[in-house]
Amino acid sequence: MDDDGIGFELVAASLRADSADIGSFLPALATKLAGALPRQTTVRYHGGFLSKKKSVEAIDVDLGDERFHIEEQQGRIEGRRQSAVRGIVLKNEILPLDSWIEALSTRIAEAAQASETARGALKQMLEGS
C-alpha cells in the first residue's frame, strides 16, 4: 500500500463489491471504471438504437500495453487480459473473475503510484463505492 493508503487490495475490494449479483455487476463496474478512468475505459452496450433499455455488453480498460476485457456470456462473466502492441493483441488470456479483478486492481494501483492524475481518479472511484 502506498503513502496515500491506496493499494490494490482496496481497489479489488471496491471492484468485487457488486460481483455477487451478475445482473448488476457489469453496469456497476462500468460506472466505476468509466468514472475513474474515462480515457482508458470503453463500455459497449447492447439493445437496439430505438430500444429504451440498453444493458452493458462488455467493458475494455486499456492500461498501457495491457487491455482488460470483461463481458457476460450466457449468464456468466468472462474476463480476459490481453497484451497488445500498437493495437495488435499478441496474447489473450482468459481469467476467472477473481483473478481478473486482482490483475486489473494491481495494474490500476501501479498506475496510481506513477501518476498524480491516476491517483486522483482512483480515489474518486474508491470514494464512490
Image (tube, helix red, strand yellow):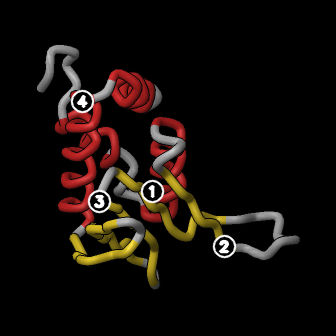
Point out the tag, 1 or 3, that comes first from the N-terminus: 1
Point out the tag, 4 or 2, that comes first from the N-terminus: 2
| 89 relative position to 57: left or right | left
Determine the CA span between mark 1 and mark 2.
16 Å
Instruction: Give the number of the disc on residue 25.
Output: 1
Q: Which residue is mark 2?
A: 46
Q: Which residue is mark 3?
A: 66
Badge nearest the viewer, 4 or 2: 4
| 116 relative position to 28: left or right | left
Badge nearest the viewer, 1 or 2: 2
The furthest residue to the front? 86
Q: Along the line of sight, which residue is nearer the eye, 3 or 66?
A: 66
Q: Along the line of sight, which residue is nearer the eye, 9 or 89?
A: 89
How far across and how far down the image is residue 116, in percent? 34, 21
Q: Residue at x 27, y 37 (%)?
A: 111
**Dot 2, how many residues are within 10 Å of its Cα: few (below 14), some (14-19), or many (20+)?**
few
Determine the CA span between mark 4 and mark 2.
35 Å
Point out the tag, 3 or 2, that comes first from the N-terminus: 2
Quadrant in which the C terminus is drawn = top left
Q: Which residue is mark 4?
A: 114
**Dot 4, how many residues are within 10 Å of its Cα: few (below 14), some (14-19), or many (20+)?**
few
Point out the tag, 3 or 4, that comes first from the N-terminus: 3
**Dot 1, how many residues are within 10 Å of its Cα: few (below 14), some (14-19), or many (20+)?**
some
The furthest residue to the right? 50
The furthest residue to the bottom? 74
Q: Tell me which amino acid carries mark 2.
A: His
Point out the tag, 1 or 4, that comes first from the N-terminus: 1
